[in-house]
Image (spheres, grey):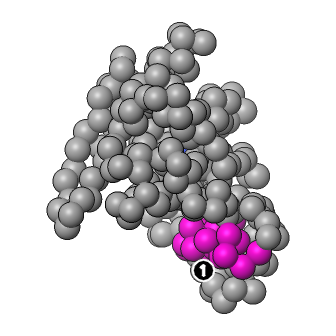
Amino acid sequence: VELDASIMDGTRHRAGAVASLRDIRNPISVARLVLERTHHTTLAGEGALRFALQMGFKPEQLLTPESLKKWLDWKADPKRPTFWQNPSENHDTIGMVATDGKGHVVAGCSTSGLAWKIPGRVGDTPLVGCGVYADDNIGAATATGNGDLMSNYCTSISIIHYMARGASPQEACVALLEHIAKTDPANRSGDVCVLALNAGGEVGAAAMHKGNRLKYALWREGKSELLESIALY
Ligand code: ASP
């Protein structure tokens, strides 16, 4: 289990991130301390773990008995999916964008990445501009899906750039997905889901295709709603 996470403060234009972090349950909290306690932006692997331990995090077994069994079954299967040849689409990420209603925005993203990834693989989540971006003058964005695909499009900063040119958060999410699909029609079936928000509290969300719909929670004025984004294809 190797975890990736990043968090970005739109006032300071500063992010903190960790990549390929083992044995620590809450990588986003470690990413936040990279932002708050150091002058670095990203720590990876062994160094990220050492930093977490220095900050008082306790190492623990992150595999549940169920996930350990799945991993042992996967290893024993000669036809198992691998990222050498036949990748599986199996992943789960939490991405968040938020505003205080006074012009301040933040973004955060945290994941264990893709199941059965090659050790050391870094997804889009801890890459500033891919998994997160936040700029108080424009807004905040985050992404979930196939990070090996999305990293090539610098998803979050691209959405911010569309917004800087006048697009609403919703228009910006759709514009980026259309661009990804246009550059390679095979990407229409790629797992790409994006969320964005501007400092005025307008929200955007979109998924590339109907087979991988994006459900997202919108919390506003004390009320939380579960919504589903549009899907382009
Ligand atoms: N984007 C993540 C990754 O590729 C996975 C996810 O969003 O579920 O590591």
- Above or below, 144 against 14 in this view is above
Q: Residue at x 56, y 67 (%)?
A: 28
x and y percentages locating residue 195 in the rendered image: 42, 42
Q: Which residue is mark 1?
A: 60
Q: Residue furthest bottom?
A: 56
Q: Nearer the viewer, residue 194 or 37?
A: 37
When asked about the image quadrant of residue 13, the answer is bottom right
The answer to whether residue 38 of the structure is visible from this angle is yes
Q: Looking at the image, is 230 positioned above or below residue 186?
A: below
Quarter of the rendering containing residue 34: bottom right
The range drawn in magenta is 21-38
Q: Nearer the viewer, residue 100 or 97?
A: 100
Q: Position of residue 88 (x, y in %)?
A: 54, 35
Amino acid at dot 1: Glu
Magenta stretch: includes residue 153: no
Q: Where's the C terminus, which quadrant?
A: top left
Q: Is residue 23 magenta?
A: yes
Q: Main secondary structure of the magenta part?
A: helix
